[in-house]
Amino acid sequence: MESDFYALVEKRQSCRDYDATREVEEAKIQRILEAGRLAPSACNSQPWHLIAVTQPQLLNEMADALASMGMNRWASQARAFIVIVQEQPNFTAWLGGWIKNKHFPLIDCGIVASHITLAATQEGLGSCILGWFDEKRVKRMLAIPRSRRVLMVVSLGYSNEEHRTHNRRDIESIASFNRY
């Protein structure tokens, strides 16, 4: 039985071709930010700050920062970006991470990115998670403190792409019950 959630997961794909003439409505961005805000995190630490970039001049500067070293040249077509900044975890999450040798904010910010991209799909938008960019330039441009890390940027816009079939490995090769 297919639910709306599974249909949404199937529909979501990384978009690299946006309609540059079509602005993304602020109300949609607000709902997408709210979906990110509601993401779970280790010990409810919520170690993130989300920055929605929508001003035309900043969009151009962001596209340039994202296209560093020849990557992500298509980013200039995006009509909005959500920048995911890693914040410090609360003491409980920090201590648990130290004990278990895991950096929970990285996991938590990944969950936020997933919520954002699924919400964008629900809103009829395309999205793509970007990890390759000029972090120093993004930090300067958006007045992000030097002590913070910009982990990811999610591009948003109305997609020009047709839905494509996901090329994924068979379930048997990536999942099992009770044993590896």
Image (cartoon, rainbow, N blue to C red):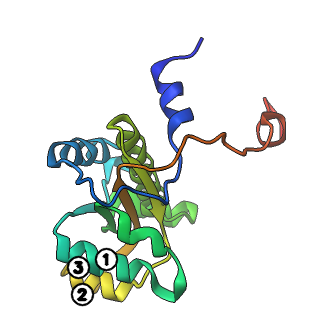
Instruction: Please name the residue that numbered disc 2 is placed on.
Output: 140
Q: Quadrant of the C terminus?
A: top right
Q: Which amino acid does label 3 sit on?
A: Ile
Q: Which amino acid does label 1 sit on?
A: Met
Residue under the point 24% across and 51% down: 24
> Disc 1, disc 2: CB below 8 Å?
no
**In this orientation, does residue 148 appear?**
no
Label 2 crowd (10 A; few <14 / some 14-19 / many >=20): few
Instruction: Please name the residue that numbered disc 3 is placed on.
Output: 144
- Find numbered disc 1 in the image and state the secondary structure of the residue it sits on: helix
Residue under the point 57% across and 66% down: 101
Residue 62, disc: 1
Mark in the foreground, 1 or 2:
1
Based on the displayed image, in which of its 4 quarters is residue 134 positioned? Answer: bottom left
Residue under the point 40% across and 40% down: 121
Residue furthest front as drawn: 21
Q: Is residue 115 above or below residue 75?
A: above
Residue 72, disc: none
Q: Is residue 53 above or below residue 43?
A: below
Residue 177 in the figure: left or right of residue 117: right
Q: Nearer the viewer, residue 54 or 151?
A: 54
User: Could you say where residue 172 lies in the image, as x and y percent from the top left?
Assistant: 83, 35
User: Could you say where residue 113 lies in the image, as x and y percent from the top left?
Assistant: 41, 53
Label 3 crowd (10 A; few <14 / some 14-19 / many >=20): some
Q: Quadrant of the N terminus?
A: top right
Q: Which of 124 and 48 is in front in this view?
A: 124
Label 1 crowd (10 A; few <14 / some 14-19 / many >=20): many
